[in-house]
Image: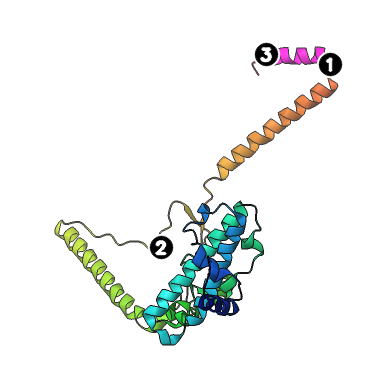
Amino acid sequence: ENYSAEDSMTNSQRERWTGLPGVWICVKQERRPFLASECNELPKAEKWRRQVICLSHCLFPLLTAGLGEFRIRDLNDEINKLLREKGHWEFRIKELGGPDYARIGPKMLDHEGKEVPGNRGYKYFGAAKDLPGVRELFEKEPVPPPRKTRAELMKSIDAEYYGYRDEEDGILEPLEQEHEKKVIAEAVEKWKMEREARLARGEEEEEEDIYAVKDDEVCDGKGNVTFQLFYTNVFLLLYLQIEEALVRRKKMELLQKYASETLMAQSQEAKTLLGL
């Protein structure tokens, strides 16, 4: 197919602009496949990858603040679409036996764009980073204060933490005094009612002897009261039984060590006759 002089001049200008000779001429001759998997030739896959890179470079300088919000969003979407397509072509080139550009190739515009966390690879370029609602996504959250260790928390714990100083505020003590007066008044009223009931029945009121000694207490004659050891006899009996068992065991050990079998049999027979 023959091209006019105007077409040749236009192609030359585009080649100088993009730095990739023949790319725009190929666009007029052959259309890039919609899916990278449709291409089965390695040289063509390399060519389509270069074309996608060229288009990305051409669109990026257009992202200026003077375009308006909607146009900037459209161009940013187109650049992200081309970056994804570039990844598809690199994967297809690797399948066809070519180099692994995803590992060894440059990242192109990736270092110039900012990716929003949790946005699955979508990036913002140029003026798109300053769009309303986008700028807030990149604002760094304030660093949370460092968490204190258990040892640091224990340093600030004192008696007040356990409630030993609750009465110093002057609120709890009056409440306790009021409750104490109420309880004492109820106890006195109950005692008076029981006393009047006993007197009405004709029962003589027996005054409690505060100096009486209880059954389990012993007075030493000097006004001092000591508690009697109730379990003394029990402990003494157990001690005697244990001592007797130890003596018997010692005798058996001596007999087994020094006595003959005949003497042992006679001794056992004597014990049997005596019922021991």
Q: Amino acid at mark 2?
A: Tyr
- Of tags 1 and 3, which is closer to the observer? 1
Can see residue 133?
A: no
Is 189 left, or right, of 48 in this rendering? left
Tell me the magenta residue range: 261-276
- Name the residue rendered at 64%, 39% in the picture: 239
Residue 156 percent coordinates (x, y): 54, 77
Query: Quick one: SS at disc 2?
Result: loop
Indicate the quadrant where residue 87 lies: bottom right
Which label is found at residue 260? 1
Can see residue 69?
A: yes
Quadrant of the snapshot with the C terminus: top right
- Of tags 1 and 2, which is closer to the observer? 1
Q: CA distance from mark 1 to mark 2?
A: 69 Å
Viewer-side residue, 13 vs 42: 13
- Relative to 161, is 247 above or below? above
Is residue 16 one of those drawn in magenta? no
Is 234 left, or right, of 192 in this rendering? right
Is 91 left, or right, of 71 in this rendering? right
Residue bearing mark 3? 272
Residue 74 percent coordinates (x, y): 40, 74
Main SS of the magenta part reads helix
